[in-house]
């Protein structure tokens, strides 16, 4: 059953695994139609902790893509600290994700509310139901399924901080899982923790799907004695014992990749951090990470938050806005 979680065919066309590629054909012509052909998919923005720019990036990516003809829905999945609506200048909507989770409404589509930006819908976070901060597995699968069923071009999911299973599962179903980090040692530490947690979560779903659990567990237990240090060592261990299963595991985990954005950079040295982290991931863990770009520290960002407007609308020519647009381009969304 957990197909969505275990097999998010991320290597295929964006959105393919989630059925988004089958969205209804464009009705208009011109730019909107063309934009829809460019790329569809699910983008999830996560990171080790709060206050590192996840909401900034999610909201403004959503605005930018909507401005360029994509039909976009932003989902506030920070179930503990939902605030996406404030950043967009929308009053707390009457219906939220919690109404869907508690089955007051059946379809995720019914809790999408409009925003001041044409083409941009919002699913507000569950502000009111404490229990929804930790949905059960079946509830989570229902949300994931409905994300796939949304009839839009792009879904942008703004995740809460940390490495809880719920957060990781949303991150892992995305076509583009973007990890944000700020240039501080604690944040970098959290980023590595996030990468590891996401990798092992993917490993777990793969091992369950192919009955490789006993072998993987054995490998994990032998870690210190056999010198298994990296994910690549672990795959090699499983491959030696079960070549067929190991090959499947290798294939699945080779597809595991993340994208990285470094936010709040102030110096050229901080701008280089992204390459350093992605190189380290490849070299030491054998994990593919593409560095999408940096967002500089920019007063326009906090000023626009105070005015409850996305920086892209409030200060379109600011350094931060230009950086978000470049990140959208690095993701493959051309304007
Ligand atoms: N690039 C930046 N320049 C200046 N301030 C920033 C920047 N990124 C984030 N901030 C500040 O940090 C706050 C938290 O950012 P936010 O996107 O809400 O983080 P998260 O969603 O990760 O908790 C913002 O309200 C803003 O004041
Ligand atoms: Mg946030």
Image (cartoon, helix red, strand yellow):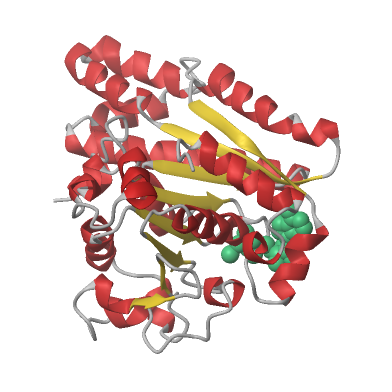
Q: Nearer the viewer, residue 314 or 136?
A: 314
Q: Quadrant of ligand 2?
A: bottom right
Q: Residue at x 62, y 21 (%)?
A: 279
The answer to whether 242 is drawn above or below residue 4 in the figure is above
Relative placement, left or right, of 270 versus 153 is right
Relative placement, left or right, of 295 versus 23 is right
The answer to whether 31 is drawn above or below residue 85 in the figure is above
* Residue ranking furthest to the bottom: 94
The answer to whether one can see residue 93 in this image is yes
Q: Nearer the viewer, residue 294 or 170?
A: 294
Residue 103: x percent and y percent?
Answer: 22, 81
Residue 228: x percent and y percent?
Answer: 47, 19
- Could you say which quadrant of the image residue 217 lies in? top left
Q: Nearer the viewer, residue 130 or 17?
A: 17
Q: Residue at x 24, y 60 (%)?
A: 151
Q: Residue at x 22, y 29 (%)?
A: 212
* Residue ranking furthest to the right: 267
How many numbered callouts?
0
Residue 258: x percent and y percent?
Answer: 48, 35
Q: Residue at x 36, y 85 (%)?
A: 95
Relative placement, left or right, of 241 versus 51 is left
- Could you say which quadrant of the image residue 313 lies in? bottom right
Relative placement, left or right, of 189 versus 101 is right
């Amino acid at each position: 059953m957990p197909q969505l979680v275990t097999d998010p065919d991320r290597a295929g066309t964006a959105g393919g695994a989630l059925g988004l590629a089958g969205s209804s054909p464009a009705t208009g012509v011109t730019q909107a139609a063309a934009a829809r052909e460019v790329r569809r998919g699910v983008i999830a923005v996560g990171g080790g902790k709060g206050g590192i720019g996840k909401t900034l990036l999610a909201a403004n990516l959503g605005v930018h893509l909507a401005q360029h003809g994509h039909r976009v829905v932003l989902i506030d999945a920070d179930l503990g600290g939902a605030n996406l609506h404030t950043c967009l200048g929308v009053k707390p909507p009457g219906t939220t994700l919690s109404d869907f989770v508690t089955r007051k409404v059946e379809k995720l589509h019914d809790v999408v509310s409009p925003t001041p930006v044409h083409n941009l819908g919002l699913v507000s976070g569950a502000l009111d139901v404490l229990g929804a901060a930790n949905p059960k597995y079946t509830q989570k699968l229902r949300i994931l399924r409905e994300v796939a069923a949304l009839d839009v071009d792009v879904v942008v999911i703004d995740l809460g901080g940390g490495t809880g299973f719920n957060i990781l599962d949303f991150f892992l179903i995305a076509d583009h899982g973007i990890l944000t980090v700020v240039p501080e040692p604690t944040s970098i530490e959290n980023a590595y923790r996030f990468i590891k947690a996401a990798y092992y979560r993917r490993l777990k779903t793969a091992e369950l799907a192919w009955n490789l659990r006993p072998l993987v567990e054995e490998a994990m237990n032998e870690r210190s004695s056999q010198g298994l240090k990296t994910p690549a060592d672990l795959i090699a261990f499983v491959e030696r014992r079960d070549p067929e299963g190991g090959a499947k595991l290798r294939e699945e985990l080779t597809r595991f990749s993340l994208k990285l954005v470094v936010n709040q950079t102030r110096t050229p040295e901080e701008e280089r951090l992204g390459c350093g982290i992605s190189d380290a991931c490849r070299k030491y863990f054998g994990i593919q990470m593409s560095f999408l770009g940096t967002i500089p520290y920019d007063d326009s960002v906090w000023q626009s938050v105070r005015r409850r407007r996305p920086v892209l609308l409030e200060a379109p020519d600011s350094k931060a806005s230009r950086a978000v647009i470049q990140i959208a381009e690095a993701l493959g969304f051309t304007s």
